[in-house]
Image: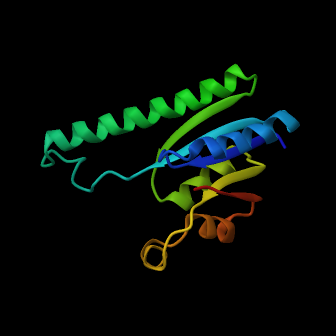
Amino acid sequence: MKNILVAIDLKGNDQVLIDKATSFAEKFNSKVWIIHIAAPDPDFVGFSVGPQYIRDSRASELKQEHRQLERFSEALEKQGIASEGLLVQGATIEMILKEAEKLKIDLIISGYQDHGFFYKALYGSVSNSLIKASKIPVLIVPID
């Protein structure tokens, strides 16, 4: 197992997933790729009609997300684990699988948080969708 992709959402429970990836990486001498799928830009932001403050705010969010990924990656590097952060925009499942294929990932690690019925009905479950769509083994880690 040479490459592990850990998908994080930057909502505070990410260390659990990174710790799990770290334990595999130490055992198999793997590289850990930390991916965060950023929310897509609103349709109008790319055009001159979009308010500048919205573009500035979005740029600031993306910079913060990128810095957080860099911090996670640097922490792994200090432990002697090869690591790289990936910040991409798009549909979550599609982008995870696209990057996994491109990077020749051997294992995808994702988290699972139990949400109520209405949340699942409206948004679905990333972990369930990932399991169904992936040809690569997926490890789902429960997080609180």
Q: Please state if 4 lies on the left or on the right of 71 as rendered.
A: right
The residue that appears at 51% across and 69% down in the rendered structure is: 115
In this view of the protein, which residue sits in the foreground, 38 or 26? 26
Position of the N terminus by quadrant? top right
**Is residue 142 depicted above or below 84 in this figure?**
below
Measured as percent of width and height from the top left, residue 123 is found at 45, 71
**51 relative to 125, above or below:** above
Residue at screen point 74% across, 63% down: 135
In x, y percent, where is residue 44? 21, 54
Residue closer to the observer: 47 or 123: 123
- Residue located farthest toward the right when viewing the structure as drawn: 27
- Residue 63 in percent (x, y) is at 38, 32
Answer left or right for 106 relative to 115. Answer: right
Residue beneath the point at 76% across and 51% down: 107
Q: Nearer the viewer, residue 86 or 11?
A: 11
In what quadrant of the picture does the C terminus appear?
bottom right
Q: Residue furthest top?
A: 78
> How many numbered circles are shown?
0
